[in-house]
Image (cartoon, rainbow, N blue to C red):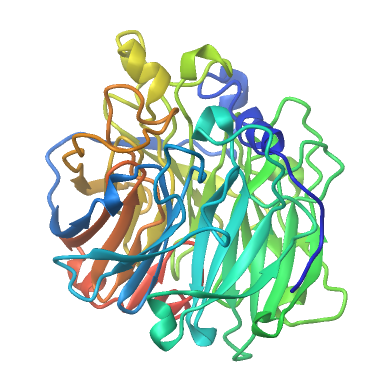
Amino acid sequence: MTRRGSVATTLIVVCILLVAQVKGARFTAARAAHTGHTAHKAAQAGQQPVGAFQVVGHSALLGRGMNAALAVAGRYAYVGSRTDGSAGHPHAGVLVVDIARPASPRVVGEIGPPDEGNRGETARELRVWPAQHLLIVANFACSPLLHGCAQGVAVAPTFRFYDIAGRDAASPRLVDTYYPSRLPHEFYLWADPRRPGRALLYISTPYLGRAGDQLLVADISRARAGLVREVASWRAEIPDPEAYAYLHSLSLSPDGRRAYLAYLGGGVLVANTSDVARALPHPAVRLITPVEDRAHWGNPGAHSAVKLPGRPYVFVTDEVYGTFAGLYGAQGCPWGWARILDVRDERRPVVVAQYKLVTYNSAGYCSSVPQDREQFASYSSHNPTLTAHLAFVSWHSGGLQAIDLADPLRPRQTAQFLPAPLPAVATEDPALSAGRDKVVMWSYPIVEDGLILVVDVRNGLYILKYHGPHEAEVAAIRFLEGNSNLGDAGS
């Protein structure tokens, strides 16, 4: 067992996530204007899409609600939970779903207490490292307010590693627990393409204090033997007192030599991570983008940043919640959307295009938005997975978006999936589905054997087939996800 770090409380998680959204979508024109020194146009989704998503299969995930991240390995999918194992939250652990028959996925197991589904703890982020047959689950404290979790429960953040080889795939077996030295939020799994058996977790650790490091890199190559080693720690110095400059998430180039940093109100920067990729002793992470030349557009800012395969562009999403009864200041309409950055010159990323949902991401709609939608829904972009010419983006109450990026300067909607909501679930999301809007598409979409798997917080797991421009490209994909370099991402 690997143990490092201290107990993290629920309060820390709430503050980290919400301080970055406090002044939300309505930032000043002066700050919004700095987008990387180039004018750009906004493409809007609203016309009849030229393609469509076909529903192949659906699992309501026991109607529990509060579903979180998705991981897939072969015939099984694993789904985490945004809430905890308090009374009234049934099946709050990691659900195991048999997807061998995509038309009829079914829950066949659950990782429950004491490993998962504990009081005060969320199984928020999941990934599978197939080379070692390991399921990785990131756990940390969850919020009584945002997630309905138990109050006053001390939770130590962990990464738990489960054996999913052979028969253990349907009933994962805990083999190691890593206690990171700092509180994690999200992570990117990078498997070394040049050194089989080596893999790293790039963990965002957003700190309230400006002095704290916000990136932690852990070598998990020997996790099965109970050894996880922290090999790098870093932060960008962004001296802007008005910006919520916290590292929310990042992605890497397949070779591991570049990192694309989504620094919330601090914007988007590119870093050189070659030392880490090469396994040098005492590796350094070096900014390529000078802080003064970063692309930024005010708070809350960049949530996720993923590079287009083989092309010098980065696809960036925002994430903006509703006003949530005014508890955390002005957010809500027009929520957040997607931007495309030109990174031909990595020292100076430039916003060259935007993609919005017509109506919901338009400022003109905000004067007429229903109060419950303004407070308890989000029509914001969230997590993207990119093929060579398409972006599949979970867009909260905007469903799943398919965006044609053949011309990155003119992104256009090719398909949209809005499921019929379940009549009821055990736990509604207090911040995202407590009003009239009952669709909350949330996870990074995963493409496996040409099918797209995606999780809705409220309504469960969907298995879809995409029809439209570039569908042959999607059909040929064996495996692809936006938060690792596994499968086709490395090809």
* Direction from residue 397 to residue 337 in the image, left or right: right
Q: Residue at x 35, y 8 (%)?
A: 367
Depth check: give the residue in front, 435 or 121.
121
Q: Give the number of callouts.
A: 0
- Picture quarter with the N terminus: bottom right
* Direction from residue 129 to residue 109 in the image, left or right: left
Res 468 seen here: no
| Location of residue 128 in the rendering, given as x and y in whole percent from the top left corner | 48, 73
| Location of residue 417 in the rendering, given as x and y in whole percent from the top left corner | 20, 46
Q: Quadrant of residue 189?
A: bottom right
Residue furthest top as drawn: 367
Q: Residue at x 20, y 39 (%)?
A: 422
Q: Quadrant of residue 488?
A: bottom left
* Direction from residue 85 to residue 457 in the image, left or right: left
- Picture quarter with the C terminus: bottom left
Give the answer, above or below, for where 430 lies relative to 71: above
Res 224 seen here: yes
Q: Residue at x 61, y 36 (%)?
A: 17
| Location of residue 49 in the rendering, given as x and y in whole percent from the top left corner | 14, 45
Depth check: give the residue in front, 8 or 409.
8
